[in-house]
Image (tube, rainbow, N blue to C red):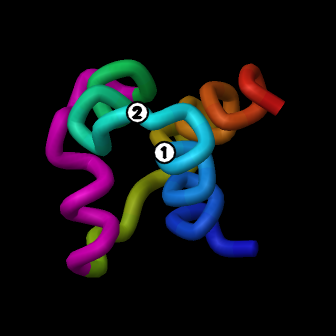
Amino acid sequence: MSLLIRIDHYLRATATPATKFGRMAVNDPRLVADLRRGRRIGQRVRDRVEALLGSEA
């Protein structure tokens, strides 16, 4: 499953706004919107996002 799909599932399941998720994960409120527009992220950002997603599993 792609990272963006996992983020979307998390957002729906927790009723978290996309901007808040970005701030919590990497202090970037535009993260999710940018990912939806095709932004590529590095491994460090991916690791931080994965850690946040994993903390709610």
Q: Give the class, few, some or many, for how many residues have Cα within 10 Å of label 2's Cα (few <14, many ≥20).
A: few
The quarter of the picture where residue 35 lies is: bottom left
Where is residue 51 shown, x and y percent of the image? Answer: 68, 28
The quarter of the picture where residue 47 lies is: top right
The tag earlier along the polypeptide, 2 or 1, is: 1
Residue 14 relative to residue 15: left or right: right
Residue under the point 39% across and 20% down? 24
* Viewport quadrant of the N terminus: bottom right
Where is residue 4 shown, x and y percent of the image? Answer: 51, 65
**Residue 32: mark in rendering:** none
Instruction: Identify the residue under disc 1.
Output: 11
Region in magenta: 26-37
Where is residue 41 shown, x and y percent of the image? Answer: 40, 58
Q: Is residue 36 magenta?
A: yes
Where is residue 32 shown, x and y percent of the image? Answer: 31, 54
- Of 6 and 31, nearer the camera is 6
- SS at circle 2: loop
- Can residue 19 be seen here? yes
Instruction: Identify the residue under disc 2.
Output: 16
Q: Are marks 2 and 1 in contact (CB under 8 Å)?
A: yes
* Viewport quadrant of the C terminus: top right
What amino acid type is highlighted by mark number 2?
A: Thr
